[in-house]
């Protein structure tokens, strides 16, 4: 079955540590996205990538980094510079790089808690 | 730039009753509109989308939405709600020259028996 997988489902981190969230898709989609979700705030775009080896900052990129070395993979690193990293993180992909119109498909999410 | 508002944070309906979730958008040209549903602790699932054509769009799970340009709205409806519909619902708007989808803050639906 085609889809998007995110791992781990739950992640705990001590303050000052970097942590990497995994996102893999086997839908052969060109574009991939990372969102942060906080209660009552909807989804906020962290980073997106329209093509391999290229990515762009979204609305809240500070304290995060990404890479896109393979079409199917788009890992997100939450660095110690992120002031309030506790949140639910969602990865998505879409068939093309038409960011404003493409249908996005979401993974199951990773809940990150900073202790 | 486009924006979207979901005026209702929470809505409670009785099982079997009809449902309407409101979504208002702001965009000068024809928007691309989406409704997604999220069960607790899960990702988002696409319910339906509108790009052009018939303004009444049918989706999965018995949902439909109507695009009303004059009211800048894209409200989601279901004639008879089931307990399994309890979830959070997100409206999103995109644009042909835009660089992202903009999501509303969500509406939490509670279903009482």
Image (cartoon, rainbow, N blue to C red):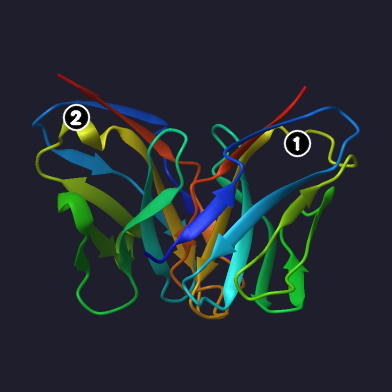
Q: Quadrant of the N terminus of chain B?
A: bottom right
Camera-side residue of B107 and B38: B38
Give residue A51's quadrant in the image.
Answer: bottom right
Which residue does the numbered mark 1 point to in the structure image? Answer: A85
Please give the name of the residue rendered at 91% of the width and 33% of the height, measured from the top-left corner: A16
Does residue B3 appear in this view? no
Residue lying furthest top in this view?
B113
Which residue does the numbered mark 2 point to in the structure image? Answer: B83
Q: Is residue A18 left or right of residue A67?
A: right
Where B49 sits versus B38, above or below?
A: below
Give residue B80's quadrant in the image.
Answer: top left
Determine crowd level at label 1: few under 14, some 14-19, many 20+ residues with C-alpha closer than 10 A: some
Classify mark 1: helix, strand or loop. Answer: loop
Determine crowd level at label 2: few under 14, some 14-19, many 20+ residues with C-alpha closer than 10 A: some
Query: What is the chain identity of the residue bearing mark 2?
Result: B
Query: What is the chain identity of the residue bearing mark 1?
Result: A
Q: Quadrant of the C terminus of chain B?
A: top left
Q: Position of residue A56 (x, y in %)?
A: 75, 69
Label at residue A70 = none
Please give the name of the residue rendered at 83% of the width and 27% of the height, measured from the top-left corner: A14
């Amino acid at each position: 079955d085609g889809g998007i997988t995110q791992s781990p489902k739950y992640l705990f981190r001590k303050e000052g540590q970097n942590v990497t969230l995994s996102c893999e898709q086997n839908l052969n989609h060109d574009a991939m996205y990372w969102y942060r979700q906080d209660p009552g705030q909807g989804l906020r775009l962290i980073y997106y990538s329209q093509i391999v080896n290229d990515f762009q900052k979204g609305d809240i990129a500070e304290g995060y980094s990404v890479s896109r070395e393979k079409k199917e993979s788009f890992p997100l690193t939450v660095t110690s510079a992120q002031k309030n990293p506790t949140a639910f993180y969602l990865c998505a992909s879409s068939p093309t790089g038409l960011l404003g119109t493409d249908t996005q498909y979401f993974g199951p999410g990773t809940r990150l808690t900073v202790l | 730039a486009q924006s979207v508002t979901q005026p209702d944070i929470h809505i409670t309906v009785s099982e079997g009753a009809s449902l309407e979730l409101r979504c208002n958008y702001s965009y000068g040209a024809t928007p691309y509109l989406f409704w997604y549903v999220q069960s607790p602790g899960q990702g988002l699932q696409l319910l339906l989308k509108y790009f052009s054509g018939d303004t009444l769009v049918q989706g999965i799970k018995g949902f439909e939405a109507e695009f009303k340009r004059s009211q800048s709205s894209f409200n989601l409806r279901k004639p008879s709600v089931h307990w399994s519909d309890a979830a959070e619902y997100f409206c999103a708007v995109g644009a042909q020259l835009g660089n992202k989808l903009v999501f509303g803050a969500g509406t939490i639906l509670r279903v009482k028996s």
